[in-house]
Amino acid sequence: AQTVTQSQPEMSVQEAETVTLSCTYDTSENNYYLFWYKQPPSRQMILVIRQEAYKQQNATENRFSVNFQKAAKSFSLKISDSQLGDTAMYFCAFMSYTGTASKLTFGTGTRLQVTL
Amino acid sequence: GAVVSQHPSWVICKSGTSVKIECRSLDFQATTMFWYRQFPKQSLMLMATSNEGSKATYEQGVEKDKFLINHASLTLSTLTVTSAHPEDSSFYICSAPLSASSYEQYFGPGTRLTVT
C-alpha cells in the first residue's frame, strides 16, 4: 500500500514571497502520478499541478513548481510570488499508473496562510 | 473544464434515518467514480470506487451495508448512508476521471452531512 506524508501541518508566508511545501511518499511501484491539490475554504478540490513519475523534468504551472526526487520519494511544491488567494489547504496525492482510472491516496495536508 | 456536481450540498438528518447523496458528471460520462470522506481538518479518505453497471469496490474498514453505492448510469452515482448515526457526520466528496484511462479526476463540491 502507498503512503503519503506531509510533515508540515501549517505554514505561513507573506504576500509576494516564496514558500515550499514538503511531501514524501512510499511505494514499491515504478510508474505512478503525483499531484498537488488545493482546497480553499469553499472545500472544492482544485488540481494545482501533476507529475508523471517517468518524467525527470519537474512540472511547472505558472507560479507553481515541483521538486520531484524519485529516488528519495520526495515531491515538494514551491509557490512563488504568493498571493492572498493561495490561502488554502494543500494536499499531496499519489496515484498508481494502471492504465485505467485509479484512486488517489492523499497526505494529511498543509494549511497555508498567506499574509499581508 | 469538466464539471462534477453533488446534491445536496448539505443535509441534516436524524439518527436512524437514511440519506442519499448524488454525484453527477455534467458534461462527460464516467464509468468510474470515487467516494471520499473528509472529517474536519483532516484529509480525504477513499471509501469506495463506484463502477457503472457493477458492484462498488469498498476500501478496507468501510461497511458496504451502511454505505450503499449505486452507479446506475454513466453520469450518476449515489451514496446512501443507511441508519445514520452522529459519527457518520462528515464531508463527503465524489470524484470522476474524465475517461477510463485518464489520470485526471474532477471533484464534486462536496456534501456536508450532519446527523443529529
Image (tube, rainbow, N blue to C red):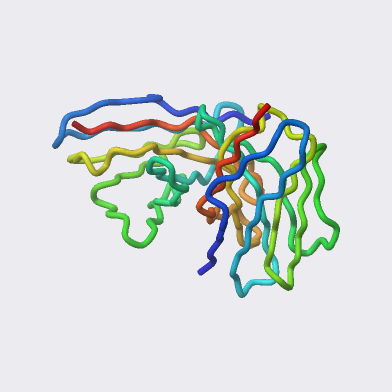
Quadrant, the N terminus of chain B: top right
Measured along the vertical axis of the image, is residue A15 above or below residue A67?
A: above
So how many labels did they put on this image? 0
- The quadrant in which the C terminus of chain B is found is top left
Q: Quadrant of the rendered structure where residue B88 is? A: top left
- On the image, the x and y values in percent for residue A58 come to 82, 55
Is B42 placed above or below A81 here? below
Residue A62 is left or right of residue B14, and the answer is right
Residue lying at the far left of the rendered structure: B16
Residue name at image x 24 percent, y 44 percent: B87
Q: Is A92 or A110 nearer to us in this picture?
A: A110
Name which residue lies at 34% across and 39% down.
B90
Q: Residue B111 appears at what percent x and percent y?
A: 40, 31
Decide which of A90, B75 is in the foreground and name it: A90
| Residue at (61% x, 62% y) in the render | A96
Q: Identify the image quadrant of residue B72.
A: top left
Q: At 68% across and 57% down in the image, what residue appears? A: A33
Would you say A80 lies left or right of A3 here?
Answer: right
Q: Could you tell me residue B59's position as x and y percent?
A: 39, 58
Which residue occupies the foreground of this view, B18 or A10? A10
Most extreme residue toward the right is A57
Which corner quadrant of the image does residue B113 belong to? top left
Q: Is residue A84 above or below residue B84?
A: above
The percent position of residue B48, horizontal first and vertical second, equals 41, 51
